[in-house]
Image: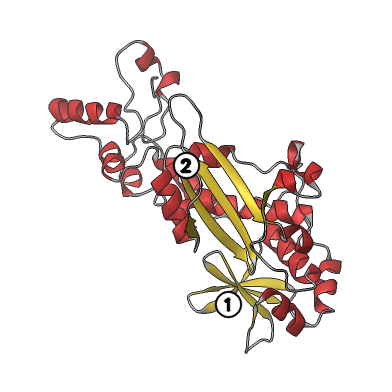
């Protein structure tokens, strides 16, 4: 199968030079096509394209999709193949958090009543039910969300993230909604490890159909043929490697709420497959919309890779 998109992200299928046979695609950085293109460039120009050679050396297929450093100096130091405006847009939007929209695309708004419900609770009991820390300085719940520390500031009614040893306000509606749902709902210390289930096995399985389905296509496009990248990102996010499928990681976005990603690599006969699994107890401590938000967050940071 011809791989027309180059490591830089340019799709040669839509270029007339390719159709006319005047130029061939470089292909993904890990492909044999990329190696042949690099060799040809060395013969013709005395050196290979810096972008293609970097992708090959770092075992990256597509820089815009797979590299946490994009756009790097190989792009910004030249007008080829992208202009400054495009690269500035990429950098700006990559620094943004996950889209704050629900499954139908409507903006998520966190109602004040959700904070009211949490403020009314005994934080000591909530901490015991979730095995969460109470911050000594503020008296607020503090927990590890993937690879970052989060403070649930009930006084300011916002989430804070510790960056460079300083607490900073974080506006991530998906996370805020899921946090308030969890800490307001949990009412006992639920045992873990009794049963692992998918969304289709939950009591409210019907919710996770149609537009509410858990989205896997982007993860499969990114990691379906890159198990090492999948494992590397999982570890970067604080995940644990598991012995399931061809590669599997357990993420712990909330205390006592594991989310398992199990990947089967594609081959010439079968496409890659991905399962997202939970401990059965998740349906006792999170509503279905909150589960959707939590998985969407985990998947977002998996896709961001080691830049997350």
In the image as oriented, which residue stretches furthest toward the bottom?
Answer: 136
Mark number displayed over residue 256 = none
Disc on the earlier residue, 2 or 1: 1
Residue 3 visible, this orientation:
yes
Residue 215 shown left or right of residue 35 in the figure: right
The residue at the far front in this view is: 194
Q: CA distance from mark 2 to mark 1?
A: 33 Å
Q: Residue 92 at x, y = what percent?
A: 51, 52
Query: As displayed, is residue 105 above or below residue 23?
Result: below
Above or below 280: residue 3 = above
Q: Are marks 2 and 1 in contact (CB under 8 Å)?
A: no
Q: Which residue is mark 2?
A: 223
Residue drawn 43% across and 29% down? Answer: 267
Q: Is residue 97 visible?
A: no
Q: Which mark is residue 167?
A: 1
Q: Residue at x 37, y 37 (%)?
A: 61
Instruction: Tell me the residue at 77%/73% (across/down).
Output: 188
Q: As displayed, is residue 24 above or below residue 273?
A: above
Q: Residues within 10 Å of mark 2 (few under 14, many from 20)?
A: many
The quadrant of the image that shows the N terminus is: top left
Could you say whether the residue bearing mark 2 is in a helix, strand or loop? helix
């Amino acid at each position: 199968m011809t791989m027309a998109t180059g490591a830089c992200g340019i799709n040669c299928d839509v270029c007339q030079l390719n159709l006319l046979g005047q130029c061939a695609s470089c292909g993904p950085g890990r492909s044999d096509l990329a190696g042949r293109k690099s060799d040809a460039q060395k013969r013709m120009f005395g050196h290979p394209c810096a972008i293609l050679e970097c992708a090959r050396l770092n075992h990256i297929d597509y820089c815009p999709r797979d590299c946490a450093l994009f756009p790097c100096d190989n792009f910004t130091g030249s007008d080829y193949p992208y202009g400054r405006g495009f690269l500035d847009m990429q950098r700006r939007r990559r620094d943004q958090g996950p889209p704050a929209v629900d499954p139908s695309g409507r903006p998520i708004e966190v109602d004040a009543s959700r904070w009211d419900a949490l403020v009314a609770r005994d934080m000591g009991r909530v901490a015991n039910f979730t095995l969460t820390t109470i911050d000594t300085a503020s008296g607020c719940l503090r927990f590890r969300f993937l690879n970052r520390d989060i403070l649930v500031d009930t006084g300011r009614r916002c989430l804070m993230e510790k960056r460079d040893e300083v607490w900073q306000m974080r506006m991530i509606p998906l996370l805020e909604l899921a946090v308030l749902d969890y800490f307001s709902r949990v009412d006992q210390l639920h045992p873990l490890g009794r049963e692992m289930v998918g969304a289709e096995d939950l009591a409210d399985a019907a919710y996770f159909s149609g537009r509410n389905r858990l989205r896997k296509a982007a993860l499969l496009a990114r990691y379906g043929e890159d198990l090492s990248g999948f494992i590397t990102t999982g570890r970067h996010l604080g995940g644990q490697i598991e012995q399931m499928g061809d590669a599997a990681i357990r993420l712990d976005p909330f205390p006592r709420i594991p989310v398992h990603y199990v990947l089967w690599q594609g081959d010439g006969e079968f496409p890659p497959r991905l399962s997202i699994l939970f401990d059965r107890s998740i349906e006792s401590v999170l509503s279905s919309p909150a589960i959707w938000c939590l998985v969407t967050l985990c998947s977002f940071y998996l896709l961001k890779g080691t830049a997350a």
